[in-house]
Amino acid sequence: MIVTDRLVFLHLHKSGGTFVSECLLRHVPAAHEIGYHLPRHMAPPSVSGLPMLGFVRNPWSYYVSWHAFQAGRPQPNAIYRAASDDGRRDFKGTLLTLLDLESDAARLSRLVAELPETYGNRGINLPGFALAGIRDSGLGFYSYLYRYMFGPDDGRVRIGRLETMRDELPAMLESTGTPLNDEIRTFIAQAAPRNTTEHSRYTDYYDEELSARVAQRDAPVIARHGYVFGS
């Protein structure tokens, strides 16, 4: 969570937040971080009335990026280990397990117990009690993270799309009254992406069954932001 005197930026996992956070910290006076991947309800009362911004990405793309990043780590996080059976499942098997986590009571209980009990300052920063809310929600993992991060759909958070971030971000910042100088405009337009993961086109990882399951589980995000598989 990045706070300035004019806005609060909420960093949804692997959805362009590292780029936006660096942009703000480098180029907006008084910008500072008050917690890593903290959700909207954790904003201090002193800033909770400020405009709030965030970014989302295509859920099909998110899952490929998440899987590639975790699978390539020497020590993947507990969520990946639980969904992949410690790396023994392939992408499809891992994702089907993750998408059904909300209804897999035994697996979810074990995972909640394994996750940290409090917030930290690294990784996905999702304590067990925070993930426990996915139980019986009907939501895929990404849609649950989205709801957890941004809160109720009440118009309080302006959410752009990662895929058009360079076009949307200047207007989003200006809507909060944040002045944009040449340096920040250049950063947004030209700076390299941050925290990226190497993988093939996300569409190559899906068959019809898996694509349809994401469409079902992550329907709220897909519908709200107009995502289409292959776009």
Image (tube, rainbow, N blue to C red):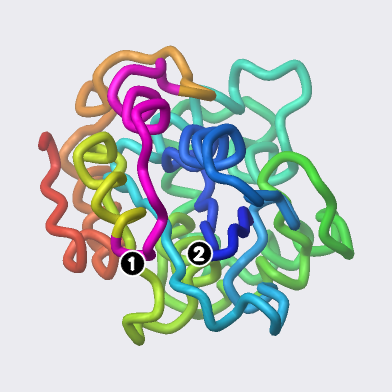
For image coordinates 30% across by 45% down, the residue present is 169
- Left or right of 193? Residue 71 is right
Label placed on residue 66: none
For image coordinates 38% across by 65% down, the residue present is 176
Residue 189 located within the stretch drawn in magenta: yes
C-alpha span from label 1 to label 2: 11 Å
- Magenta span covers which residues? 175-193
Q: What residue type is labelled 2?
A: Leu
Q: Quadrant of the N terminus?
A: bottom right
Q: What residue type is labelled 1?
A: Arg
- Left or right of 34? Residue 88 is left
Q: Quadrant of the C terminus?
A: top left
Q: What residue would you read off at disc 1?
A: 158
- Left or right of 121? Residue 21 is left
Within 10 Å of disc 2 (Cα), the crowding (few <14, some 14-19, many 20+) is: many
- Left or right of 191? Residue 130 is right
Q: Quadrant of residue 61?
A: top left
Q: Which-is-in-front pick, marks 1 and 2?
A: 2
Q: Which of 41 and 166 is in front in this view?
A: 166
For image coordinates 29% across by 63% down, the residue present is 175
Badge 2 element: loop
Q: Mark 2 or mark 1, which is nearer the start of the sequence?
A: 2
Residue 187 located within the stretch drawn in magenta: yes
State the image coordinates of residue 68 (x, y, percent, origin top left): 49, 23
Q: What residue would you read off at disc 2?
A: 7
